[in-house]
Image (tube, rainbow, N blue to C red):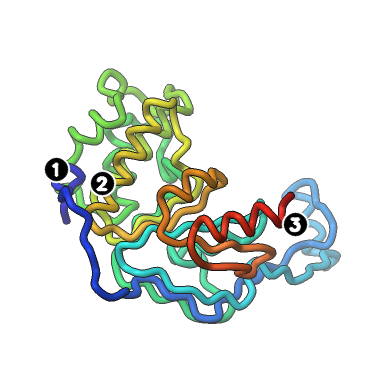
Amino acid sequence: MPTVSEVIEEKIQFSTPEPIIQLENVSVSYRLPTERIGTFKEYAIRKLQRKIRLEKFWALTDVSLQVNRGEVFGLIGNNGAGKSTMLKVISKVLKPTKGRVVVYGRIAPLLELGAGFHPELSGRENVFLNGALLGYSRSEMESVFDEIVEFSELEQFIDSPIRTYSSGMFARLGFAVATAHVPEVLILDEILSVGDEAFQRKCNIRMKSFQQAGTTVLMVSHALDMLEGMCNRIAWIDHGKTQKIGEPQEVIAAYRGENL
């Protein structure tokens, strides 16, 4: 698998669209309590007493879409619209209640930076731990370790416990680890706003290098202007349903018009 330093310079062009992600009539439901329960203890007691009333909530309803290889595809919608649920279904974190999801390629999901970091371990140890959770071998992580440290700008702190890191340092290391290799499919959930402005520019440059290497990028963000400039297509999700899929400018205009 190529490293970021080996990314090619020119974007790969495809003569005909080749699907890499397909959702066919996908629905996801949860069973939620009808009333608020303050503590886990209260929940356990009520459950034992069979006093918990649950209702079905559909986070996604009959969603069908196709993302093509090498495409940058954006998802927009209000909070709670179902965007993050869709990313989790595609990443195999959630199993759909109905429908079918097919992904042709290895996924690197950046749903939560640093997920799996252990606070008592050093940054160095967490690099290998997080890499293993992402499916990479120790030798693969060793080959990119120096690049991860350099990119995260944490040379002086890499052997310090993660619990001593600021939130910005934590996010920088998480992003550097998760993007140390060039994946076939990269899934981003509101993570390009990590760190300060200078580091955000580095993140955007890395994303562009992935695009040039032919990586398929599926991303959620409320930064509509950024999505309009980066994406080939965008889908607007509302209340778990696709409202519109198409050219970024057209879909964003429709979404903004609905939310005036």
Residue 80: numbered disc: none
160 left or right of 165?
left
Q: Nearer the viewer, mark 1 or mark 3?
A: 1
Measured from the top left, where is residue 82 in percent x and y? 61, 61
Disc 2 packing (10 Å; few <14; some 14–19; many ≥20): many
Q: CA distance from mark 1 to mark 2?
A: 19 Å
| Element marked by disc 1 | helix
Instruction: Identify the residue position indicated by label 3 in the image.
Output: 44
Measured from the top left, where is residue 114 in percent x and y? 42, 41
Dot 3 and dot 2 residues touching (CB under 8 Å): no
Q: CA distance from mark 1 to mark 3?
A: 47 Å
Kindly tell me whether residue 15 is visible in this rendering: yes
Kind of residue at badge 2: Ser
Disc 3 packing (10 Å; few <14; some 14–19; many ≥20): few
Measured from the top left, where is residue 89 in percent x and y? 50, 66
Q: Earlier in the sequence, mark 3 or mark 2?
A: 3
Depicted 39 relative to depicted 89: above or below: above
Q: Nearer the viewer, mark 1 or mark 2?
A: 2
Kind of residue at badge 1: Ser
Instruction: Identify the residue position indicated by label 2 in the image.
Output: 209
Q: Quadrant of residue 33?
A: bottom right
| Residue at the extreme top | 156
Instruction: Identify the residue position indicated by label 1 in the image.
Output: 143
Measured from the top left, where is residue 177 in percent x and y? 30, 41
| Element marked by disc 3 | helix
Residue for point 45% across, 66% down: 90
Disc 1 packing (10 Å; few <14; some 14–19; many ≥20): few
Dot 1 and dot 3 residues touching (CB under 8 Å): no
Kindly tell me whether residue 84 is visible in this rendering: no
Q: Earlier in the sequence, mark 1 or mark 2?
A: 1
Q: What is the quadrant of the N terminus in the image?
A: bottom left
95 left or right of 31?
left
